[in-house]
Each structure stands twice: as C-alpha cells, then as structure tokens.
Image: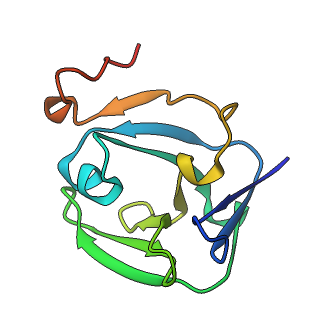
Amino acid sequence: MARIASCACGNLRATCTGEPRKVSLCHCLACQRRTGSTYGIAAFFGREDVQVDGPSKCYTRQGDSGFAVRHYFCPDCGSTVFWEPLRRPELIAVGVGSFADPSFPAPSQAVYGEYRHPWVAEQS
C-alpha cells in the first residue's frame, strides 16, 4: 500500500509505503506553533519507506531530547509535509493532515499532555 502526503499546492509530496510504525499526537508548544493548531499528529515511517518529490525548504529546531528536528516545507505554499527527528535517524515523520485521508490510522499515543488545551478531548 502506498499513501501520498502533499503540501497545499501539491508541489512537495511524500509517498509512503506500508503502514506507519507509529502514529503520535503531540500537544507540545513547538507542534502547536508549527501547525497553528492545538496539537500535531505525526505518522512515523522507516526512512526506506518514504520517497520525497518536489522542492522543499528546511527549518531546523532543537528538540526537547537535545537532538535537532529538521522540518521540511514547501517554498511556495509554506505547508510542512515531513520532518526528520535526528534522535531517530531511521525514521521520517509525516504530518497526518498532509495525507488528507479521513481513514488514516488513529494515533496510538499522545505526548506532552501537560500542554493539552483543557477543551481538547484526551485521547483514549
């Protein structure tokens, strides 16, 4: 099975084969700022299972782990499509919203719950 994630304008795409190794909902403040929402949701795939096509720009930030995280976004529309958590170099994280697929697997975990907005339901 292959799924295609893309930016809003379609110029940056990530084709992911197989099922994600993990889907995680993150309430951290960095994800809130990155998404403009109250949380971010990432699907983690093995690096070998992701093919990226199209132009991208990279923004690198320091993660809480002490390792950098490289975020790749479309230089035309600005949508972040995927990122590389350097703490786990064998993985690529892809924004679940970039798949625009309501049938995508649900998160199996939620992290940084201490930053969850009180009106956002807890993941069960």
Q: Which quadrant of the structure image shows residue 101?
A: top right
Q: Which quadrant of the structure image shows residue 48?
A: bottom right
In the figure, 53 relative to 7: above or below? below
The single residue placed furthest to the top in the displayed view is 124
Q: Which of these two is toward me, 78 or 18? A: 78
The image shows residue 39 at horizontal and vertical percentages of: 32, 41
Q: Residue at x 43, y 60 (%)?
A: 88
The image shows residue 123 at horizontal and vertical percentages of: 38, 19
Quadrant holding the C terminus: top left
Q: Which quadrant of the structure image shows residue 8?
A: bottom right
Q: Which of these two is toward me, 45 or 88? A: 45
Q: Residue at x 59, y 86 (%)?
A: 55
Q: Residue at x 22, y 36 (%)?
A: 112
In the figure, 72 relative to 32: above or below? below
Count of marks placed on residues: 0
Q: Which of these two is toward me, 119 or 94? A: 119
The image shows residue 3 at horizontal and vertical percentages of: 76, 52
In the figure, 39 relative to 52: above or below? above
32 left or right of 41 in image: left
Q: Give the color scheme: rainbow, by chain, secondary structure or one colour.
A: rainbow
The image shows residue 56 at horizontal and vertical percentages of: 53, 83
Q: Residue at x 41, y 82 (%)?
A: 58
32 left or right of 46 in image: left
In the figure, 20 relative to 111: above or below? below
